[in-house]
Image (cartoon, rainbow, N blue to C red):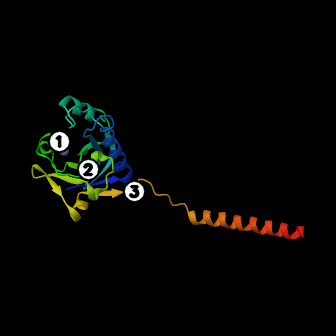
Amino acid sequence: MTVVYVTDGILDKTARLLASFADESESEGVVYWFGLELGDLAVVTTLIVPDADTSTGAVRTSAAVNAEAVGALAGTPLVLLGQAHSHPSRWVEHSSVDDRDTFAQFPGALSVVAPHYGRKGMKLASCGVHRHIDGTYRRIRGAQVEEHLRLLPAVRDLRDRTTLQERRRTGWLQRLRLQFQGAHNDD
Ligand SMILES: [Zn+2]
């Protein structure tokens, strides 16, 4: 089974999009994860927000809405890898409706459930990670999660901040010394 890689940046963006479903009236949200499949690994690159019906506070997507979501990436090498959706509380199991109505229904499809409407971000430890295995969604727990879903950094800033601090401190000391000398010369 492929290992799906996602950057922390994509995960943060997913949480913000899920939370946006609950902006006006509290509703669960859904975001589709698309990306590249490269042999035994896949990388999430792109988020598609379907034009879901959220009038009941839950998410419903019609066949037409899902066709539109897939069509948005026609002509690209990106494929549907899975989805993330939100729940109101910290409960992140799949409901029977989730099992039945989740758009992605193929071996290896990933379904991540974010707690608290995604408002508190998507730390993987607090999310429910589910994978379509042997014809049904199964919750993946604990150490097994990394066999299915792994985090990558979106940005690493390697500039040396200590050098900058050092320069600032040296500058401050020099100014102090000059002030002292100036005061001394005035005597
Ligand atoms: Zn659900």
Q: Is mark 2 within 8 Å of ligand 1?
A: no
Q: Secondary structure at mark 2?
A: loop
Q: Nearer the viewer, mark 3 or mark 1?
A: 1
Q: Secondary structure at mark 3?
A: loop
Where is residue 84 shown, x and y percent of the image? 26, 46
User: What residue is drawn where x is 88% and y is 69%?
Assistant: 185
Taking the image in four quarters, ligand 1 sits in the one at top left
The quadrant in which the C terminus is found is bottom right
Does residue 110 sit above or below 179 in this rendering?
A: above
Question: Quick one: label 3, few (<14), some, or many (20+) residues within 10 Å?
Answer: few
Question: Quick one: label 1, few (<14), some, or many (20+) residues within 10 Å?
Answer: many
The quadrant in which the N terminus is found is bottom left
The residue that mark 2 highlights is 115
- Which amino acid does the dot numbered 1 rest on? Thr
Regarding residue 77, the answer to whether it shows in the image is: no
- Which amino acid does the dot numbered 3 rest on? Pro
The residue that mark 1 highlights is 102
The residue that mark 3 highlights is 153
- Of the image marks 3 and 1, the number of the one nearer the N terminus: 1
Question: To which quarter of the image does residue 171 belong?
Answer: bottom right
Q: Nearer the viewer, mark 1 or mark 2?
A: 2
